Image: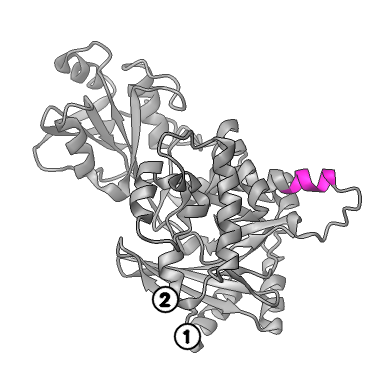
Amino acid sequence: MAILKPFKGLRPPKEIARQLASRPYDVLNSREARTEAEGNPYSLLHIIKPEIDLPESIDEHAEEVYSKASENLAMFRNNGWLVQDEKDCLYIYAQTMNGKTQYGLVGCAGVEDYMNGIIKKHELTRKDKEEDRMKHVRVTNANMEPVFFTYPAVAEIDAIVADIVRNNEPEYDFTADDGFGHHFWVVSDKNTVNRLTGLFSQVPFTYVADGHHRTAAAALVGNEKKKNNPDHKGTEEYNYFLAVHFPSDQLTIIDYNRLVKDLNNLSEEEFLGKLGKVFEIKEMGDEIYKPARLHNFSLYLNNQWYSLTALPGTFDDNDPIGVLDVTVLSKLVLDEILGITDLRTSKRVDFVGGIRGLGELKRRVDSGEMAAAFALYPVSLQQLIDIADSGNIMPPKTTWFEPKLRSGLVVHLLD
């Protein structure tokens, strides 16, 4: 059964919370982070993207960068920009997008839960990205950013969260520059904390929705500390890491689309001819076309949108991986027609989260940067859970969750 542990959070004073909270480290590059943090000394980007405080020429994985993260965290604490709560708490973190609000329960997940499969994942991680975040955790001795988990909804947990939200003013309540609302409550009442952790202990599994590399890094560093501590007792803070847990019935996955740089030496006519052997193709004109259902795709090519519907027999609805449209597209088009066999390493393919809209696909093809774009119907959360439960792994860049968690509303220290 899953662990949800209260902890003494490190948090910003209310008056600077909006300025301090930042987008996650992995959704913006160093240049974008410099721009976003410009003129804002409070931004958590100074800790999670610390290269922004060093010369632009520096390698973002240089030792000086990690040292700067530790130095900046100490500075934030000394300045009173991050202050630790005096007692163990849980927290509620709610996000509002397009009029819909989802409510997450913030607490620590267990390192052992990750190691023994109670926390289930659906994506592979890359060792270089794991090691980057592990170094960051080691030098800061903290989980600076939460990971995004989901779990099968529990009615009583939902009711307690709803009661807290209804009867208490949020500690933080702001709308970020992207228009998404962020609302945060501190749950310090011991009886309520005990009730929530007790109910959560009945949850059989939790699932990594977003943040597989941060999850792996946090768990691996915790396990590393356990092995290096001859007096390990199992109650140390490093046995846990920071997570926001959302009930599965409140989340929505949006589309994650593909762009290709070339047509593998095929003419447009030859390319469409090969597509016609495995898809029903309909010309949709120059107006943006969005996929209407599973196994229906959009293709944008040479100022023209097309509807592509996979023909019967080209996919396997009884296979939890084979049924995914990312699998269908990868097999029928990227691999067999375009010769793109490894999505994790190929430089001929790029990925765009649906939050950017299909207009972004059109723009990049029209600019000449890309040869064609494919839009996919979103994966369902149930598909994600089914794949994780079966022990399978989704293809790369399958799921995109919005809104992203803001980092910095609460930090977990490992001692």
Q: Say above or below: 319 vs 92.
A: above
Identify the magenta region. 222-228
**Picture residue at 44% right of the left edge, 31% below the top:** 316
**Residue 149, position as x, y percentages in the image:** 56, 56
- Density class for disc 1 (Cα within 10 Å; few <14, some 14-19, many ≥20) is few
Where does label 2 land, which residue? 173
Where does label 1 land, which residue? 169
**What's the image's color scheme?**
one colour
**Residue 317, position as x, y percentages in the image:** 44, 36
Report if residue 225 lies within the magenta region: yes
Q: In this view, does 378 lie to the left or right of 232?
A: left
**Picture residue at 35% right of the left edge, 35% below the top:** 351
Q: In which quadrant of the rendered image does the C terminus lie?
A: bottom right
Q: Residue furthest bottom?
A: 167
Q: Distance between the residues labelled 2 and 1?
A: 9 Å
Q: Residue furthest right?
A: 231
Q: Is mark 2 in CB contact (under 8 Å) with mark 1?
A: yes
Report if residue 49 lies within the magenta region: no
Give the tally of numbered discs. 2
**Residue 153, position as x, y percentages in the image:** 56, 65
Q: Can residue 216 be seen in this view?
A: no
Q: What's under tag 1, amino acid-wise? A: Glu
**Observer-nearest of 160 and 321:** 160
**Picture residue at 82% right of the left edge, 61% below the top:** 235
Q: What's under tag 2, amino acid-wise? A: Asp
**Observer-nearest of 285 and 281:** 285
**Residue 183, position as x, y percentages in the image:** 44, 73
